[in-house]
Amino acid sequence: MSRLLHTGQVIVDLVMALDTLPATGGDVLAQSATFEAGGGFNVMAAAQRNGLPAVYLGRHGNGRFGDLARAAMQAEGVQIAQPVSEHKDTGLCVALTEASTERTFISHIGAEGELSVEDLAQVAPRADDYVYVSGYSLLLEGKAQALLDWLLALPREITVVFDPGPLVKAPDSALMRALLPRIDIWTSNGPEAMAFTGATDIASALRELGRHLPAQTLRVVRDGPNGCWVGRAGEIEHVPGFKVRAVDSNGAGDAHAGVFIAGLASGLTPAVAARRANAAAALAVTRWGPATCPGTAEVNALLGDAGK
């Protein structure tokens, strides 16, 4: 059976809801504040809840945040490949969600910011696995090169999924130039694709991605409530979204990515998998918190209602 092998970072989110961010030097009261597992956990939880087993290849710390991250992964059934890191705790992200559903993140990297070739050797990828790579990993000095070397040594039949995230904004670094030819699936939101390519709209970004990715790379670019664009060079189509009342967009992209990959692993075409992913993301934004992806039954129910 296929697995999702996640090489990114599981951290802990301090999730706070507020009306609007204060001005520099200001102060506001939040309506709520909770600690939740986040980061790469969101994608793995989405995959697990939709039938695709997940394995976390990253490190996790020895303090209270590491304990919280491990407990969350274990509760979802995620396999943890690495032992506890002895000298650091898991990192923290302050996730601020405004009434508009806009999110602001401030992160501090912990044990998950380091990874060695020996760590990665703890799991032997299989031909039908999906290896998930986060752009954040390419920014981490203690992880990036070892991860890239491992990825480039993988057998070609193993599918590599790349999520650039908001901080990888150009294709011209040495790491990106080496990784781009090995990417089998690109998944991002519209602003991330535009920032990466220098385009000013999603249509242009999709075309510009063709200058950097192999023609056979499957591209998924999310467009918020409008759904997403999916396909390979010359065959990209729009898959509509679902109308819902959004309260928190935190984790919606992760829900989309996890459910999309789970759909592909179960044999769905990219367009059908994208429709399932759109439904999952729509349900996720109706709930507070980072890991709010629904399971298979809820996604099926929304798809069924939409077809009436």
Image: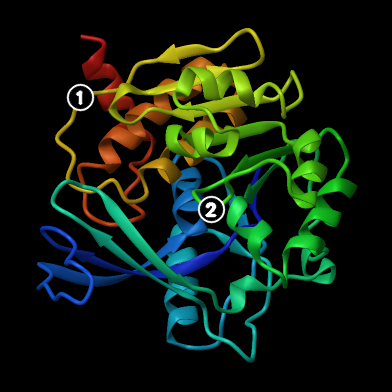
The location of residue 266, given as percent across then percent down, is: 58, 28
Local SS, label 1: loop
Q: Is residue 237 left or right of residue 207?
A: left
For residue 243, the mark is 1
- Horizontal and vertical percent for residue 256? 43, 36
Left or right position of 293 against 194: left
Quadrant placement of the C terminus: top left
The quarter holding residue 307 reads top left
Count of numbered badges drawn on the protein: 2
Amino acid at the residue labelled 2: Leu
Screen quadrant of the N terminus: top right
Task: Please indicate whether residue 247 sits to the left or right of residue 129 in the image.
Answer: left
Q: CA distance from mark 1 to mark 2?
A: 29 Å
Q: Is residue 276 visible?
A: yes
**Up-down: is 52 above or below 268?**
below
Give the residue type at disc 1.
Lys
User: Is residue 1 in view from this perspective?
Assistant: no
7 to 298, vertically: above or below:
below
Q: Which residue is mark 2?
A: 167
